Image: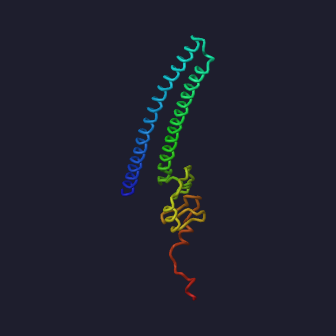
Amino acid sequence: MADFLEKLKKGVNDGAAIASIKSKNLIEITKLKNQISTLEGKKKDQIEELGAHYYRGYRSESLETEEVQLTIKTVCEAIASIDANVREKEEAIKTIQQEEEAMVNSMKTITCQCGEIIKPGTLFCKRCGTKVESMATPQTESQAAVISAEMRCDCGKPIKENMRFCGGCGKNLADQITAASPKEDTTHATE
């Protein structure tokens, strides 16, 4: 029962974290889309201005004059600047969406066919040894320091007492855990 409640608590916590990330990103994306909409309106105005300048030059047969050409060039540069700004905003939206997807994926757990919860970065189930497809998550320095103090499999993954199979290579850990259990230290006994 306690295991079920612990799993439920973790699921709720992960769900709340994911919802928080998604709502924050939705607000940011909405702001960027509003900015893009404003820029598109400015672009439309600039295109209308460009057309007006060109038509006036055509009507007065002065399209070739330096003044009209400079005015048209200035308006075209303003339109190009708006286009560049829109592209930046669209890239920012894409980046936010990719970061959100990566963060959400890193928080997801998988349930193995045997019922064991598989954390991100694990390649094999620690209970039954079944290979799972998951993305590796980067470790922070503090996580690496904690892991380095733990017992490890030959492949380098940490081993805990309740594990029957290594989460990194799938090796059966029954022999390794038995061999690593506390014994009398005979290396110093003869000194």
**Can you give x and y, in whole percent of width and height, for residue 14 in the image?**
42, 49
Image vertical order of residue 128 relative to residue 176, above or below: above
Measured along the vertical axis of the image, is residue 1 above or below residue 47? below
Residue 151 x, y percent position in the rendering = 53, 68
For image coordinates 54% across by 72% down, the residue present is 180
Looking at the rendering, which quadrant does residue 129 occupy?
bottom right
From the viewer's perspective, is 184 left or right of 3? Answer: right
* Above or below, 141 relative to 135: below
Give me the residue at 51% from left, 23% from top. Answer: 46
**What's the residue at 56%, 49% (across, down)?**
133
Residue in front for this viewpoint, 36 or 122: 36
In the displayed structure, 184 sits above or below 104; it is below
Quarter of the picture holding the C terminus: bottom right
- Percent coordinates x, y for residue 50 in the rendering: 54, 20
In the rendered structure, the answer to whether residue 17 lies left or right of residue 59 reads left
Which residue is more in the foreground, 93 or 11? 93
Q: Nearer the viewer, residue 141 or 120?
A: 141
